[in-house]
Image: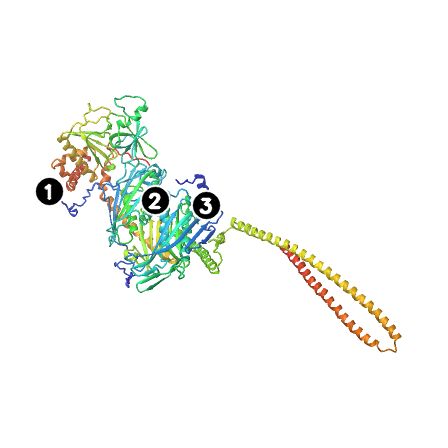
Amino acid sequence: MKETPLSNCERNFILKAIENKERLDGRQSYDYRRIKLEFGIDRGCCTVELGETIVMAKVSCEVGQPKQTRPTEGFLYINVEFSPMAEAHFEPGKQTEQANEMARVLERCLRDSRAVDLESLCIMAGAKVWKLRVDIKILNYDGNTIDASALCSIAALSHFRRPDITVSGEEVTIHSVDEKDPIPLSIHHLPLCVTIAFFHQGTYCLTDPISREEKVMDGKMIIGMNKHREICTLQMTGNMLLNKEQVLRCTNIATVKIVELNDVLQNALSADEEARSSGKPYGTYVADFRKVTVKAAESPTHSMSEIEEEARSMQLDSDRMEESEEEVVENVVKNSWLLRIKESKANEAQKVKDTICSEIDEFLTTQREMSDLQQQSIVNNSSKNNGAKGQDQDAKTDTKRKRNQNRPKKKPDTQSTAKGESLDSATSQTKKSKGKRKGK
Amino acid sequence: MAAWELLKDQNFRLDGRKPTELRRIETRLGVFPNADGSAYLEQGNTKVLATVYGPHEVKGGRGRSNPDKAVINCQFSKSAFSSSERKTHMKFGRNSSETNQHLVQALNAAVMSHLYARCQIDVYVEIVQSDGSDFCACLNASTLALIDAGIALKDIVTCCSATIVDEKSVVDVNYVEESSGSAVLIVGLLPKDEQIAYMQMKGRLHADHLEKLLDCAVEGCRNINNILKERIGEHLKTHSSHFTLTRPATPGRAERSRPAIA
Amino acid sequence: MSIDIRLSNEKLQHESTDFSAERPLHLVIPGDIITREAGYMRGHGTYMENDVLYASVAGCVEKVNKLICVKPLKSRYTGEVGDVVIGRIIEVGQKRWRVETHSKLDSVLHLSSVNLPGGELRKRSEEDERMMRNYLQEGDLISAEVQSVYADGSLSLHTRSLKYGKLGQGSLLQVPASLVRRRKNHFHNLPCGASVIIGNNGYIWICPTINEQSDKTGGFVTNYERVNSSTREVIARLMNCATALAENMVVIYDTTLLCAHEFSLKYEVKELIKPDIAKEIALLTKQKIHNNDY
């Protein structure tokens, strides 16, 4: 299928917007789109989403014979495929110029800059070496596939583990994954690419162009660099002319961007390692790249990106608020139930208390009666000395009763104090939740 | 890697050159009578032949012709006997395809292609002997061939390579220096306004050294430009009789070649 | 049969015959400044940038009153109305033929621009369209005149005169288009016994003498009568002379051809192919023309 050309009004609009330092998606000139790095379950599989562009890389290895001229070096092949699912005008199987260019850039970036140590891939000098193969497939095309692929391939290479080998004399044993843990590749540095597109005969430049911007651009410059500020590859393609100052300015922009991209990569790798080691499911890492710009001082006070961010954070907060409200409601319901239970218990306790009090009163009244009767009997039987024993017995029973009276009193107290505490906590919780509401 | 000293004590390179010295350049224009334009270029031991056919009708159907500009088509080929070891190079392999594309892009920046709308210009380059800076020699030879064909150019495209050896930048690298693994920068320049039409670097280089290396390569391009200008001038002079005879010698003659207005 | 071997070192060096002494040539290279003065009209081979006139081809600056143009050594043929060209049919299309004339773009010969056989004048019908292939096929050689030039530079040809049309027996030679000057007459019947058509696009056609009276058949009937050996020899000699002149960058028109033919008579036809003899003839011709000019 033939590629649909960009209409002239779209072209003019994009160019005009760039003159006014605006981009279609509201980014700043040197901002990157949202980057999402995802590793697969298999070692060496990585997917990068740069905005809408989706690129997948897979590293595989096999044993083979080395080159005659370099008997101690392994191989690193890079294969790029633009699949028709990315864009309808890509033909399956056909090696287009674009795919070719990308493969060559990546080869220079990864292989010629000695990012991967090829000598460490040697098993037996002159006889057997590891042949690494990075297969990159473009799954969805929206511009800037080179940056995405570079990030993807170096991430996949860092993620990859090759089978362990033991050499005993002439024999080489390649251990399977179950026998011995596979070992990581020896990677000296992590080169990443930055694509800078030029417009209006080189007057304006943007990083991370989307596919519509790419159709309108004069040409682009690809800079491959690692975080130590070592340039791994430099290429200026496109039918445009630049002068020295523009070239040096681009390298400065690239330096800043590489550091950010590197952070993304490192965080993603470490997150994945952590997830694997702790047994959690291997997750994704999301980076928001819209804040950092080279000319931070010149950025406007309010930009779309900032407003978007605020909106998002507000959304998150409101989500949380909703959650907390639900919790509060739940708590209130729970507390009300507890209150009722406690109230009922308190009532019961109160009843018990009342009954005991009434019993005590009864005791006291009976005691008085008894004592009255005893006094009468004493008066009656003053000559008789048999009443003392009865008094002692009475005294004992009195003390016993008093003890009994004391015990039941304590229970309702503790219960009431416990209820009091729970009531207090319930009230405090409600107070806290009210506080939360007020705070939000 | 062999323990060769690329830069010896007295600041001489392996082939006896100083760091800022170019190799010997020999040129010849109009080598093939069949082609519209042709050139032969020697840069030291790197020898390159370039031929240009065009502008002519676009081959391969109407779909490939561009109504605004010319379609430039380059075909790069490295002979099997060009390197020290005989090695057949795949004409349609990845490296050749990339070189073709880069040649097209570099030449597109110089050719005034709006004058050749709907036309196709074919450039065929063959490396007869390879000794480093192959691409540079190809681009220089293509420019000469285009000039020989009479195709309108904004300016001559000159190309030069440079590398850094022992913290010193060294211009016009040969095969040994190229394969030593140090970073090699290739710059294609339009010397009139000092504008860079093509740039490519391979190998690892610290960003602080880039400016130095760029300056060195640009200086090399300027020097090559002077040499090429001289050669083209000589070529024109030897064929200057053509200009006098095609022009009426005296103003009074009846037949006048009508100059066409652009 | 003997084989002749020559070493390239023994080739005579270029003798730059000093014709340039009369008028100094202003030779330029792409990117050179021609003039900074304003008020000049820009011709071929130049471009303007920031009010400065630069050259875009390598050649000699020509100034005609206020018009400045740069003429390169070699360039493809660009057509003008009224030029005589020789071309090959490469395609038979809808109501037109596509003709290859060694220019930037292929030329076009419309059905309405040819003479119908018998000389009729009528509107072209469907049947005519289907019979196109009977008139001119792919591979046929024709002589035509440029009727008009389109905006993109391609030419529209016509064969409306009886002297134009399909070419029969003869030899075709290709020379650089810049060696052919525009003149009043491009069809010459040379006294040596051959006719020559010098096309502005660099194609030269040498054939047996065209009989002015009898061969006016509208140009579509080819004469396949056997040509005798003496005429063939003359044609071959003329071919070699023209080749010699072309290789040494001498302008080709009837006078120069005749001069060259004269000088070549002392050699055999096949000897004229040798570069040193060819050069000698060319030099002699150049000198004679130069002398005749003054």
Q: Is there a contact, CB below 8 Å, between mark 3 and mark 1?
A: no
What residue does disc 1 label?
A: C2
Instruction: Tell me the kind of residue under disc 2.
Output: Asn
Instruction: Give residue B108's mark.
Output: 2
Viewer-nearest residue: A153 or A357: A357
Comparing labels 3 and 1, the label whose residue is closer to the camera: 1
Of badges 2 and 1, the one in the foreground is 1
- Mark 1 neighbour density, 10 Å: few (under 14) some (14–19) many (20 or more): few
Relative depth, front residue between A400 and A424: A400
For label 2, the crowd category at 10 Å Cα-Cα, with few meaning under 14, some 14 to 19 and many 20 or more, is: many
| Residue carrying label 3 | A18
Give the residue type at disc 1. Answer: Ser
For the question of whether residue A413 can be seen, the reply is: yes
State the SS at label 2. Answer: helix
Chain under numbered label 3:
A
- Quadrant location of residue A395? bottom right
Quadrant of the rendering where the N terminus of chain C is positioned: top left
